[in-house]
């Protein structure tokens, strides 16, 4: 049977493929790549309507109800970059930017700043910042299993700008010679809360890793494990985001720094958007999904 492939932009005919009813869309992507070398599979997205939803590449032609001389629309997603590369670039940047500004380079503070005393809180904050992003890098290598292999390369610059600029903004204020630290009790309590959130975030990532078999895109309902830090799965759909936000709130209280608070607020907003989307997807995909769960903030959101 023959399937016409049209562009989502203007409906231009891109190709006509001869396929078997049991062929998957993934196999069709391979055929298109042979015809148009710049359209590698990760760059392609099939739709049944020009502005419709992207189709699962593991679905067969027959499962989609396509017949001889049917049409499929193809969206060019643009140049792609591997998710692992994205994460490593996003996370290595703020780690090194903060560590550099922590040394009080003359470029930011002048020649004499490096010789002036630094508060204990500034040292602790630098330790927490570096540990957090080092953890993220380790998780990228050894923990995360990505459901999508790539993302548009244009997003890499936006994401890096967000992380790198905020890193410089926070580091500049916390490490400034005129920075005034809060009382030690406040900082130590916040440090304890930060530590719990970091351990909780890692625990959730590890639980999610074990939820998905290697090399698969299978979706299951995430549930608490024997690790008590995964208890938040009983309350929210995305406890990794809950712990992440909690960690940055703790960092803000520990440093009593407005730029850190702005970073925490921006992170909360973005992660809330992601969490709500995932929460809705869980409820749609699983009829027995726990009703009492919220998206990111227990009992609230």
Image (cartoon, grey):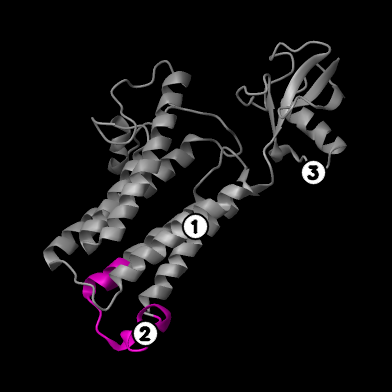
Which residue is labeled 1 in the image? 161
Per the model, the C-alpha gap separating discs 2 and 3 is 50 Å
Per the model, the C-alpha gap separating discs 1 and 2 is 25 Å
State the mark number for residue 249: none
Which residue is labeled 3 in the image? 38
Q: Is residue 116 magenta?
A: yes
Q: Residues within 10 Å of mark 1 (few under 14, many from 20)?
A: some
Which residue is labeled 2 in the image? 110
Is 76 left or right of 102, judged from the image as shown? Answer: right
- Tell me what residue is drawn at x 48 percent, y 20 percent: 285
Name the foreground residue: 106 vs 275. 106
Per the model, the C-alpha gap separating discs 3 and 1 is 28 Å
Give the mark nearer the N terminus: 2 vs 3.
Answer: 3
Q: Position of residue 253 (x, y in %)?
A: 21, 57
Give the mark nearer the N terminus: 1 vs 2.
Answer: 2
Give the mark nearer the N terminus: 3 vs 1.
Answer: 3
Can you say whether 106 is above or below 4 in the image? below
Can you say whether 125 is above or below 243 in the image? below
Residue extending farthest to the front is 10
Is 219 left or right of 265, judged from the image as shown? Answer: right
Q: Is residue 137 magenta?
A: no
Name the foreground residue: 148 vs 201. 148
Look at the image and tell me in which quarter the N terminus lies: top right
Marker count (numbered): 3
Question: Magenta region's main secondary structure?
Answer: helix
Q: Which residues are magenta?
A: 105-125
Can you say whether 89 is above or below 114 in the image? above
Q: Is residue 173 visible?
A: yes
Look at the image and tell me in which quarter the C terminus lies: top left
């Amino acid at each position: 049977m023959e399937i016409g492939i049209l562009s989502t932009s203007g409906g231009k005919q891109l190709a006509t493929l001869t396929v078997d009813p049991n062929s998957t869309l993934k196999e069709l992507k391979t055929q298109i790549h042979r015809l148009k070398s710049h359209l590698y599979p990760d760059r392609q997205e099939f739709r049944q309507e020009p502005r419709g939803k992207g189709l699962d590449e593991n679905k067969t032609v027959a499962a989609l109800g396509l017949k001889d001389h049917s049409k499929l629309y193809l969206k060019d997603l643009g140049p792609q970059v591997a998710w692992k590369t994205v994460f490593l670039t996003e996370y290595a940047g703020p780690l090194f930017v903060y560590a550099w500004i922590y040394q009080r380079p003359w470029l930011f503070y002048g020649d004499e700043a490096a010789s002036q005393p630094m508060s204990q809180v500034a040292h602790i904050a630098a330790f927490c910042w570096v540990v957090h992003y080092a953890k993220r890098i380790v998780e990228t290598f050894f923990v995360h299993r990505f459901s999508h292999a790539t993302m548009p390369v244009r997003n890499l610059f936006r994401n890096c700008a967000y992380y790198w600029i905020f890193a410089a903004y926070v580091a500049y204020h916390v490490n400034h010679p005129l920075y005034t630290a809060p009382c030690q009790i406040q900082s130590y309590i916040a440090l304890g809360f930060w530590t719990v959130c970091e351990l909780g975030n890692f625990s959730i990532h590890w639980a999610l890793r074990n939820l998905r078999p290697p090399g698969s895109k299978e979706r299951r309902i995430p549930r608490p494990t024997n690790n008590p830090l995964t208890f938040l799965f009983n309350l929210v759909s995305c406890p990794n985001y809950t712990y992440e936000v909690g960690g940055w709130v703790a960092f803000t209280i520990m440093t009593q720094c407005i730029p850190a608070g702005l970073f925490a607020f921006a992170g909360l907003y973005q992660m809330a958007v992601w969490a709500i989307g995932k929460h809705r997807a869980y409820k749609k995909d699983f009829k027995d999904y726990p009703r009492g769960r919220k998206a990111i903030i227990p009992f609230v959101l």
